[in-house]
Amino acid sequence: MKKLIFIFLLFPLLLFSQTNYYVSTAGNNGNPGTLELPWRNIWYACSQATGGNDINVMSGTYAEGTQWTLASGVSIYAMGGVRVESSYAATSQPLVKGESTNGWLHPTYIGHQEINGITFDGNNITYAAIHINFRHYVKIVNCHFIDFQYNAVTFYGMPMTSWTETSVFEPDRTMPNYFCVGNEISNCTFTNCTQGTGNGQINIGQQDGIKIFNNDIYQPLKGSGGNCGGIKFKADGYNKNTDMHHNSIIVDLNGGNSFNFSIEMWYELGGCKYYNNVFQGGTDFDAAVKGSSTYSIWFHHNEVGYPTHQQSNHYGFNLEASCSDVIIEKNYFHHVRAGIYVSQIWPILTGSGRNYHPYTNELNNIRISCNIFSNIGRLAGGGDWEPVYGVYFGRSSRVVDITTLDNIYVDNNVIECTAVTPYSYYVTGIWLPNSNTVVNNLRVRNNIIIGFAGGTNFSAPIFGTGLYGSNDINDLYIQKNLCYGNGNSNNTLLVSGYAPDPYTYDTHIKLDPLFETDYHLQEGSPAIGVGMWIDEVPTDYEDKDFYNPRSLGVYEIGTAEPEPEPEPEPGTGQIWTDGFGHILTDGLGNIIKK
């Protein structure tokens, strides 16, 4: 009986026991794949390995012209420097394909594998490097991707033909019923692996909790049209709980085309956070709800922009269609024509000519706080008429119904313009909602807006117009802002029937804010201690507490790191102080001296 029990307990271990296979440039596919007698090709190893097996690839360069069919549970590890030169040229097919039918139903055992340490070179022949379809807990780590035609890595959660859930955005369309969980892309590099607007070097769709971090992505301009060369949605997106941080994404400019995105995400379903990234190229988000999270998108502590002013029409952050519960805070936007663009354009248009969308846009609970908009503007040439602005609540002729905006907060930002073309129609720090819009509770508070002057039509720190359609603006609050060096004598400008009611307006402070070079406030700044308290924004750009009353702009006074105190000479009896000038004492309260 004891032997039977022992065998019964051992059976699962035997069933899922791990086997290590090996591949070498000196191997042979007729070998058994052991360390002593390895195989020659990685594609062959993939055809032999089953779930729970590891493929270990010895150092060297491997010419691979056959697709790797990667079984669920099989991992591939590089043993030293491994480079794969791909000549695989099948249309719309990746070199590595891991796909499990109905795998979205089985997160406990479908997937659970890793690809680690390999350099993949597509030689501008192979369509894509790796596609992982309908699997969970798959990691792509420490890999390098070079010169694929359209895509490096795709994680696809559920095919659109299997969706039956009614979309939370559009009731006549469906959305995924299931999501793939636990997938990861980390510590990888991507170079020149896509082109145009249809793909990114990384594509993700129907993912719950995917982690993308510590990656370097560079996309030169390849082909004509837009350049969405960073990270992009797959199959309408529908991702949730995305965790994307500490990535560097650089997308080369494509002239005047505004579709120059480092990241583009559609239909976010809540809990998606993007932080501590560097984006050279716009960031674009179309339609978002918070779901079971407290936010749909939390975009914070990112850098977005270009090294210098450009002769082009590019945004920093683009928020489109119906979005709610979005937090955009503590980011550094620079050298773009427009810092944040909140528009009404839906990503998928319907009807005659596919030029409009039948549903009401709802932009609710949007918070834009403690962001730095530095060197906003553009150089002359290539669409000089385009307006220049820090934050813009846009309009669109491609929606049938009225857009509603409820609970919009623009607080404690610094918005600075430094370059305006001679032909820019509108130049403004904050362009208020316009065109067939109903607005309830819009608050613009504690901001510092400087340098928005020189537009051919209108220039002002804050601007609203009824020129492009009727508006119903309720509960507009413009309070405690400092405006300096702007058009319209630093006053808010409302024209063409733009008549909010009720409307609370404080006369702007119209003095030099006395910035340090990094937007900290000098002693004596008129922006110190004159702001209003905002519960939802308790800390400044450096995550340090605001005082009450707080300062205007992004930094509280005294939050800059002090210069370290020089150490006293030994034996001088000089009193020790910390970096803030506080006298140091020992545990008994005695002043410490040297």
Image (cartoon, rainbow, N blue to C red):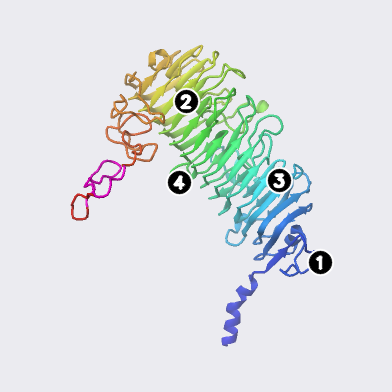
Disc number at residue 128? 3
Q: In terms of image quadrants, where is residue 539?
A: top left
Indicate the amino acid at tag 4. Answer: Ser
Residue 558 point in image, percent of width and height: 31, 35
Nearer to the camera, 96 or 495: 96
Q: Which residue is mark 4?
A: 293
Q: Please give left or right for residue 432 compared with residue 14 in the image.
A: left
Which image quadrant for residue 410?
A: top left
471 and 424: which is toward the camera: 424
Could you tell me how far apart the alpha carbons at marks 4 and 3 are, in whole angstroms?
34 Å
Of the residues tagged 2 and 4, which is closer to the observer?
Answer: 2
Q: Identity of the amino acid at label 3?
A: Ala
Q: CA distance from mark 2 to mark 1?
A: 65 Å
Residue at mark 1: 30
Residue 3 lies in the magenta-colored region: no
Give the residue furthest to the bottom: 1
Find residue 261 and report its horizontal and vertical position in percent: 59, 34
Q: What are the residue bounds of the magenta stretch?
A: 566-585
